[in-house]
Amino acid sequence: MRTPRVATLAFFALATLAASGCGSATPRIIPLLRTSGAPIVQTPGDGTPLEVVSRGTAVPDPLPVRGSDIVYGDLEGALGIAVSSATGPWAAAHRKYPVAVRGGWTVLVEVVGADAELESGGRVVVGLDVRATLRTRNGNVYLGQTQLGCHEGGLRSADEGAPVIYRCMTRIGRDLAGWLDGGVRLDPLAPESG
């Protein structure tokens, strides 16, 4: 007599847990480094004048895609590759620059905002906001800072959206290369004599 009552209570408890989200599916991680189509970049040697360092600041990594059970992993690594690839021509053109000869530059690219959503029509939309800080490698002298962002979308399912987010990251890299090419001082100011 008690067995059916216990079974009924157990069924009710499991149904309540499932309805409250406790029994929801585990998110599926899509690794951006493997699925975005990003080029394989070897670690630059000492002769590379521009070192790119990427990291997230108060941004979830993996990044959840709202409206789906997908999360994008390797956000920082994929951003570093995208920026390194996009700024490579700039770095090659500045190899003989005086600061490059004395050690080069480091650009810290911090993700300060990130959002991804699967819209009801099957379109993935992503947005990234970054802050880039340029310093000399020798002496860590501050040269400048800028804010960059992108917003991209594509008719893809959330689990196939990695190329959309990588396209957004590449645009940030190209904008950063443009800033390096004409929007920031590349040499430290000479100390004032006094």
Image (cartoon, rainbow, N blue to C red):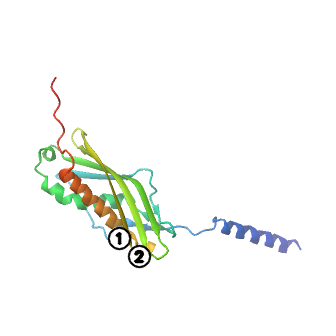
On residue 163, the disc is: 1
Q: Nearer the viewer, residue 66 or 22?
A: 66
* Horizontal side, residue 55 vs residue 93: left or right: right
**Label 1: which secondary element:** helix
Residue at position x 23%, y 53% in the image: 179
Disc 2 crowd rating (10 Å Cα; few below 14, some 14-19, many 20+) is some
Q: Position of residue 151 (x, y in %)?
A: 37, 63
Amino acid type at image mark 2: Arg
Q: Nearer the viewer, residue 103 or 167?
A: 167
On residue 45, the disc is: none
Real-space Cα distance between discs 1 and 2?
A: 9 Å
Amino acid type at image mark 1: Pro
Which quadrant of the view contains residue 143?
top left
| Residue 62 makes an appearance in the image | yes
| Residue 49 makes an appearance in the image | no
**Label 2: which secondary element:** loop
Residue at position x 41%, y 55% in the image: 113
On residue 156, the disc is: 2
Q: Position of residue 112 (x, y in %)?
A: 40, 52
Whether label 1 touches label 2, CB < 8 Å: yes
